[in-house]
Image (cartoon, rainbow, N blue to C red):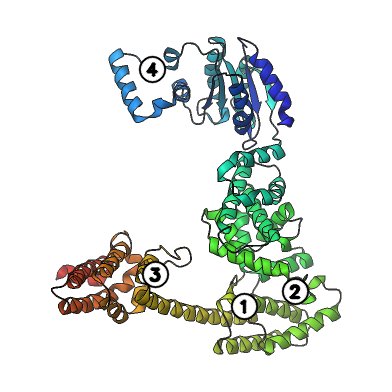
Amino acid sequence: MTEHRHIVEAFENYLESDRPGHALMVAGEWGSGKTHFWKTVLDPLLERKQRAKVLVSLYGVKSHEDIERQVVSAIYPMLKTGLFKTLKAALEKWVGFGLSLFRLEPRLHRAVFCFDDLERATIPQWEALGYINRFIEQYGSHVVILANEVKISDTRYAEMKEKVVGKTFQFEPDLDEALNSIVGEMRECKHKLLDARFTSVKAAILKSKPVNLRSAIQAVDNCNLVLKRLDGKSALPPEVLDAVTSMVAACTMQERIGKDTLGHLSALFADTHAFYFSRYVRQREGAEDGPLAAVEEFAGRFFDGNADLIPPLTAVVSFIETGRLDTDSLHAQAALLAKKESKEPDDMYRQFLRDPFMLNSDAELLRLADESTHRVAAGEITNATELSLLFSVLDFLSRHAMLQTSSADLAALFCSSIEKLSADGRFRDGDFEGYMSLSRFGMPVSEELRAVIGVLDIAKEKVHEVAHARRIENLRIEMDLHFESFVKRMTGGIDGETFDYAHEPVLSQMGSGPVARILGGKTAREIRLFESMLRQRYLRVTNIGDFLSVEYEFLLDLNQKISDLFKANKGSLQGVAFEMLSDVLTNAAKRIAPASHAEETSAG
């Protein structure tokens, strides 16, 4: 790293002394890359010089003995294995002394030791330095110490450091080279798309000031994983992949700076109209809003101060918050972003929805308000987020005497249109994607807006009910025609990330009659597969009753029908399978029985 050439040169000069008499220290903040510098620059230099080197972490060490154990383990990694631990204990018992570092390896002066995490030692840092000084004075070893001195409050530290450390270098990471080095070291695990996207990834990382190198490494890893997962889906345009990786890198870096911001971003994506009106109030009245300020601070750091440029990728935010990547959701959101990117630049209507204060004149604003009101009356708008945002804008204008129509009349118009759209079945699942009923930003919600939100919630529930009914019918069809696929789905082997069939009462919603009818036409092998699925569903989860107690009656009904099938098929392999299935159904019903039924069973 060219920026640290002076450290490398000083280190090479230091190595030329046979008994240096002091240590070198590399000091810098946590995450600045000190350890990375040792591993990628100084360690390879020692390899070329054929010098033995030992990296020791002082994290959590409580005594000199602890440090010695860490050193011994670093020199002899095999001592960490169970076999060597047993042999070591036996040898110590027979010989009568411990296998200390200084008995095992008396010639240490040719080794180069790196003691990392000095500030994280539990033992006082001056004591740790005193122990390290033994390597320098007694064995003539070369020693490098890595430390974040800002975190050291030990009152005797400065005095001991003066005796032990000859030269201290303040470490400032060469971020450009460090990031290039990180990607270079990934080798076979690096996805082919990362190189093409790396410019956008690096740009996002470098906008985080100060840059924490550990977070930067994590950001690169996260981007690599996301690109790897998305590669299995349909292709996305380069500019959308840049937006996705920039958002992944930005959220990863932001998590260290302010974790609450990620929650505020989720709220922004879920309820954009509240965010925009928070901005209106702030612009108009100068009101303070913590969540709004956090989002604007995030936009200021990573998106040139424009919150409108933050891509609405909730799957990215969730991935960084939880570590769980929902690839399907991310791809769908990225594909939606691609559609938006392919359109012409925002027209005045979108500007009207996003920020009417930015329009050129009141006349323009009133024209758009009139046109959009007619579109609502004609049932042309079916997107829930657009409807709630549009009503918020019109309601705001009405309350400031800019419209002749009252807020109450506007609410009546919107509610009537939404109810008609719902009755006619015009709403689809996608119309409610990203929609959330109430503001998370603490903005006052008028009674009229509550009314509009109420009918939208009812319409949303109806859409979900229709979708659920369709899903249940599809399960029946799959059970009938593709039995093994059905069994995998019920145990989370298929679509496990989008709908948790294993913990939802979908079997009871399918009905015991249809399930028994389908099972009656299956082979003994297929019946045993169904039995295995039931065991996993009801008998292997500790608190399964919390999720599936509602299926108690379904299990009883199904068991009765399976008993009838057993009698009808007695003397056959299929009949044996039905008998075994009946036993599992009996045990499953006992396992999830509601308290009242469990007491009756116990009393009986």
Residue behind mark 4: 99
Q: Earlier in the sequence, mark 3 or mark 2?
A: 2
Q: Earlier in the sequence, mark 2 or mark 1?
A: 2
Q: Is residue 568 visible?
A: yes
Residue behind mark 2: 350
Q: Earlier in the sequence, mark 1 or mark 4?
A: 4
Type of amino acid at the residue the image marks with label 4:
Leu
Q: What's the CA distance linking mark 2 and mark 1?
A: 15 Å
Type of amino acid at the residue the image marks with label 2:
Arg
Examine the image and state in which quarter residue 426 appears. Answer: bottom right
The reply to whether discs 1 and 4 touch (Cβ–Cβ < 8 Å) is no
- Rendered-image quadrant of the N terminus: top right
Type of amino acid at the residue the image marks with label 3:
Glu
Q: Is residue 54 above or below residue 137?
A: below
Examine the image and state in which quarter residue 245 appears. Answer: bottom right
Residue at 70% x, 78% y is 390
Residue behind mark 3: 504
Whole-percent x and y of residue 318? 56, 58
Residue at 29% x, 17% y is 93
The label number, if any, that marks residue 384 in the structure image = 1
**359 displayed left or right of 530:** right
